[in-house]
Amino acid sequence: MFYYISFLRPPPTQAALSGEPILITPQIANDLRTEYYTDVQDIFYSWFLHSPTSSSVITKPMKLTSWRASTMYKEIPVPPPRNVRSGEYWRIVLSSGTSRKDQVLSLNDENLGHRPFPVISDPIFFSARSSKAVKQERIQRSYALTATNRDHPVIFHIVEQTSFDLDKKIWDSGIGLSSWLIQLHSGMVANTALVSKVKDALSASKCNVLELGAGTGIVAIVLGILRGLPNSPVTSGKIISTDLPSALPLLQSNISSSQSLYHLGNAPEGVVLDWDEPDISTQVASFVSGIDVIVMADVTYNTASFPALIGTLSRLIMFSMSVTPAKPPLIILGYKERDVAERTLWEMAEKIGIRFEEVAQISGAVGTPVEVWVGTVLVNTQ
């Protein structure tokens, strides 16, 4: 399980140039915000100037508070940036350390999740005019991806909503699976026959990937960035990232924000796919050579959706095998157990000819790890 710094009370969208502090209530909790961090944790803040036309300006991290669950509802004043000017936009960055690296979530980190993940607010507009305070509704996190053939890490950003919409938040399995895919790409994963098969599929010159239940899009974005790295063997193939219509605006926005990091013409694409809809022809029409890999992260939290998910997997496999009968897709699942009943998915999958095998665990801070499973198609689906 991972812990996330976030805002129980977010900052306002606008603040006056009065010198008054910005009031926030930081929070440290799990991905669902249902389990709170039990240790004492120092939280540091920085101000980051949000400007598309100027070079990056970020202030030195300063201690804001020592977070304790016993005082988690306490409002904390954040001093405004020094010499802030009217018309400027600034973001608050909260982290668990005093360095710039602490403000970025490194997906290559061997100790991933051993400290709470940092967070960045939406921009706050500073104005000479006072206005009614309106609370922000979005946050952002910065992620680092380090490849063996690059001197510097690739930095990308994922926006989440502060609402309770489950498809608009980062979940543990998305981070755990993304981290594993990066380690796989970098040769840091122990080789087995099945792991080698996954690596060969993802690094083939043409690899078509379809993601189910994409949410904020982190897994598809990581796959797209890995393809865009220098000397990447993947020169063609699509990444289609799917979810319900409510998730698409944020999903597509997150994909677009990393546009410069993808291979030219090979950016992930957000597409609506409802598991309850039997017709998937529109979503798979562009996969003229079939689907090589299906990826899923945290799709098991609602056991009532399992029949629809299994039906969708069956239709996707049947479509792909109608194009390339000898090469059914591999299925990669990032999973964190929240209820033992979720593991009935494995039994349901085997009934349609999919056998899952666990290939890795990402431990996080405490509690339940993120498990990585790979499914292979044993028989033709019915």
Image (spheres, helix red, strand yellow):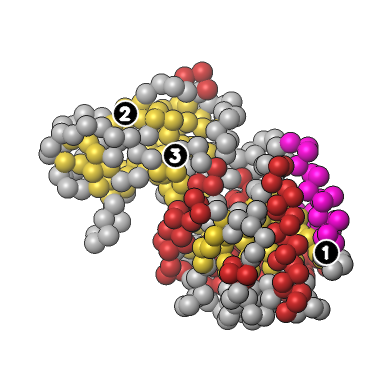
The residue sitting at 43% across, 34% down in the picture is 7
Q: Depth-wise, is mark 3 or mark 2 nearer the camera?
A: 3
Residue 375 sits in which quadrant?
Answer: bottom right
The three-letter code of the residue at mark 3 reads Thr
Q: Nearer the viewer, residue 293 or 20?
A: 293
Asked if the stretch drawn in magenta spans residue 355, the answer is yes
Horizontally, residue 116 falls left or right of residue 369, namely left
Residue 17 position by quadrant: top left
Q: Is residue 68 above or below residue 354?
A: above
In the image, the segment drawn in magenta is 339-360
Whole-number angstrom distance, CA of label 1 to CA of label 2: 58 Å
At x 86% / y 66%, what residue is drawn?
378
Q: Is residue 275 visible?
A: yes
What residue sits right under mark 3 in the picture? 162
Label 1 neighbourhood size at 10 Å, few (<14), some (14-19), many (20+)? few
Name the residue carrying label 1: 382
Percent of width and height locating residue 298: 65, 48
Q: Residue at 69% of width from left, 76% of height from top?
A: 290
Q: Is residue 269 left or right of residue 133?
A: right
Residue that carries the numbered disc 2 in the rendered image: 23
Q: Nearer the viewer, residue 227 or 216?
A: 216
Crowd band around label 2 with a 10 angstrom C-alpha radius: few (<14), some (14–19), many (20+): some
Query: CA gap, disc 1 to disc 3?
Result: 41 Å
Magenta stretch encompasses residue 184: no
